[in-house]
Amino acid sequence: MAGSTTKPRVKDMEIIEDKKLIQLLMEPTRAKIVFDYLVKDAMTVKQLAGVTGKNPGTILHHIQKLKEVGLIFEERTEQTQTGIVQRYYRASAREYRMGISEMVQATGDDATKRLRSIITSLSVYGIDIPERQIGEAVDRLTALIDRENEISSRNLIVNEVELDKLSSSERGDVSRIIRRFALEDDSQYRELRDSWHAFLRAHRTGASNNV
Amino acid sequence: MKNASVRIILDDLKVSFKFALKNVISYILALFGVLIISGILLVFVAILIFVPLIFTAGGIEGMTFFFESFGTDPSAGLANIVVGGLAIALPLAAPFFVAIGALFGMGREIVESEGTSAEGVFTWYKKKFFSLAGGGLVLFLVVLGPLILVILGGIAVFGIDFFNFALISSGTTSTMNPIIGAVLMIWFAVSLGFLSMLFPAIIDGYSVFEATKKSIRLSITYFDRVFGVWMAYLLILGALILPFIVTAFAMGTFEPALILLGSMAVPAILFLLFVFMPALTIGLTRVYMILTADDEYEEHPQEDTSGPSFIGGL
């Protein structure tokens, strides 16, 4: 809510599992506002209108929707020389991932089609999965990503104040090292990953062996 | 920044009128559009109210008799008439409350991004319809509710003679008792002042109840700023209404100064509708946004996008 005195801390990563949130983010302009801009920096309605090419009124309505569900918050307010009062909005996390199972539930056929399309597209890398096994491939990949999301969303930070002092590239690198470490440390994840890789290997055609 | 001084209040007024003038075309178009929509909704609501009434009362004659009976039937009770009157009047007024609230939406667009568009008003009208109607209802009940209660209480205690206190009769005409008139004006100014942040808060996403609380809280905490700017707008409103009062006196007289002032009535109403009203919505929204800004912001290190990542994505 606006004017709130308790400002949320920007999280390192957030998994979006709420079906309503997923549906809300299916709107392209809203997705662009959050994933392309507000995860990186705080921006005003005017700035967002400029970069998206939408009118400020439209952006303001999207901002209000996103604020209501807690995906973004007001970081600060500034008055300009011309007298306007600019509010800077910021995403609640630096990176978002959507829970695949929830995305399938929220969007129905769209997410399923996208997953099937991803599996089919592996052929460009020499992995040809026959039509009758696409369902199995989708299930394996979904299980792997779900587990990855579960582990990655755990708060592994022990010193949040120091983390905020790092530059964004340092923070990104550190975060990736630790998340990779946390994944490799999880036996269930390793099992799912090995099973998925074995599945891919089994469908690798001769062409990719040259790589 | 949040507290008031003469310079700050003057700045508030200057900025609001500057932006109102800059967006005058959008406001003119929006006002016409929103009035047409409100008119259509008014007809629709009237149909919803009166058509069932016509059928239940047994035709138009029956309905006429029904309303006339309130005047002659002492058992009808004043409270019933007032409650019944409000039950009909409030739904009819609701579209216009929403229209005023939607103008605050345009004001918000201007305050936050320097610009708005005429069609923007319809988005606010549609998206915040029930909240804005609820806000209007709160305004109506808080501002007029006590007045109605006083009238009802007065009539209950003193009977119809109560009106003799309120009105001063001279010959065939009656005018309002100046003391009561002054008290009423003070009440309107103060109660509306406390609720001046209501619509900006609704536009900001608060529920009607939360917005009412927020408006009252801001008016108390920042009394000088909220009431300072509100009173300034009321003074300008008074100056704009003056030509209308003068017109009434100027009729039949040939006093050049009065005629000159009276002739300003038409430009005054145009200014009132298309510049003052927008400026009021912009000014109050701007003050709301300044007052709700978080002072406790600590400068965080800037997010630098430069520098490559050494570690690849997962």
Image (spheres, grey):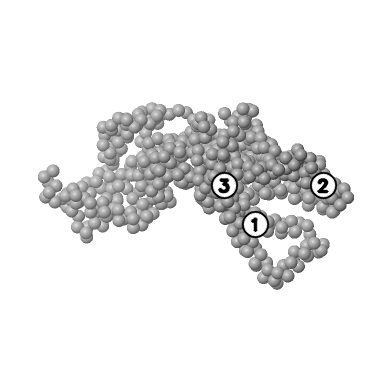
The residue at the point 37 percent across, 36 percent down is A40
Residues tagged 2 and 3 counted as in contact (Cβ below 8 A): no
Per the image, the residue denoted by label 1 is B92
Return the residue found at the far right.
Answer: B171
Between residue B254 and residue A40, name the one nearer to us. Answer: B254
Q: Is residue A138 left or right of residue A167?
A: left
Q: Chain of mark 3?
A: B
Counting other residues with Cα less than 10 Å from the Cα at mark 1, is it few (<14), some (14-19), or many (20 or more)?
Answer: many
Residue A116 image point, x, y percent: 27, 55
In this rendering, is residue B304 above or below A117? above
Q: Chain of mark 2?
A: B
**Which mark is nearer the camera, 2 or 1?**
2
Between residue B12 and residue B77, name the one nearer to us. Answer: B12
Same chain, marks 2 and 1?
Answer: yes
Mark 1 residue type: Leu
- First reached walking from the N terminus: tag 2 or tag 1: 1
Per the image, the residue denoted by label 3 is B28
- CA gap, disc 2 to disc 3? 36 Å
Same chain, marks 2 and 3?
Answer: yes
Q: Is residue B24 left or right of residue A72?
A: right
- First reached walking from the N terminus: tag 2 or tag 3: 3
Mark 3 residue type: Ile
- CA gap, disc 3 to disc 1? 23 Å
Q: Chain of mark 1?
A: B
Mark 2 residue type: Thr
- First reached walking from the N terminus: tag 3 or tag 1: 3
Q: Quadrant of residue B14?
A: top right
Residue A154 image point, x, y percent: 36, 40
- CA gap, disc 2 to disc 1? 29 Å
Per the image, the residue denoted by label 2 is B175
Residues tagged 2 and 1 counted as in contact (Cβ below 8 A): no
One can see residue A188 in this view: yes
